[in-house]
Amino acid sequence: MEIAKNDEEVNQVRKEAIKKLKDQKLVVDIAKNTKDWVVREAAVKKLEDQELLTEIAKNDKQREVRKAAMENNNLVDQTVLAEIAKNDEYNYIRETAVGKLDSEKWQELLAEIAKNDKHWEVRKAAAENNNLVDQTLLAEIAKNDEYNYVREAAKKRLKELKILKKK
């Protein structure tokens, strides 16, 4: 426990110590107050507090720490995920947020992202999301997206929807 909190220890040693921590108060303290982003990232992966995860996902200066917050299964607030999917400056953080949107109520947002995000990885994630069910849009993406990976994802999603319709 002392190793995880000690700023004088090598970050890889602290990171390993954090993996073994069970005390959420200590994990929170490290996630909020440690200067070394590698150590903060390790702590964020263990966080259970959704409010703190939200704060970190939106505001941490280090993108790897924000991504760790996004990948944490305890961050489930769909409104927060939608906001990050639209607004984060880093495509891999937006991609993670898009993948976690789990309701058909995000249909319009997923469609907008699938058509217009500047990064193909984010468009692909939107096309793959099971909650995007607009077959006309998916057909358009399958024909017209400039990246083959996005077109293939849209084609695969169309096939899945057709199989579901037959059942």
Image: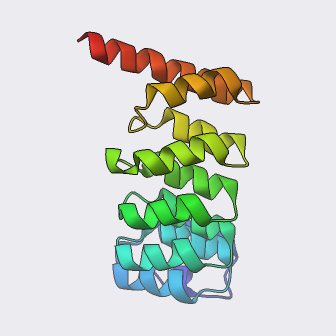
In-front residue for pair 58/22: 58
Instruction: Judge whether 167 appears above or below 64 on screen.
Output: above
Identify the residue at horizontal 73%, vertical 49% (top origin). Answer: 118
Question: Residue farthest to the top?
Answer: 166
Q: Is residue 22 visible?
A: yes
Please state the horizontal and vertical placement of residue 159, each as a whole percent of the image: 45, 15
Question: Residue farthest to the right?
Answer: 146
Please state the horizontal and vertical placement of residue 87, each as a whole percent of the image: 60, 65
- Asked where in the image residue 81 lies, by quadrant, the reply is bottom left
Please state the horizontal and vertical placement of residue 137, each as a whole percent of the image: 52, 31
Tell how many labels: 0
Question: Residue farthest to the front?
Answer: 136
Please state the horizontal and vertical placement of residue 18, each as a whole percent of the image: 50, 71
Instruction: Judge whether 72 appears above or below 26 on screen.
Output: above
Q: How is the image coloured?
A: rainbow
Instruction: Judge whether 3 appears above or below 144 on screen.
Output: below
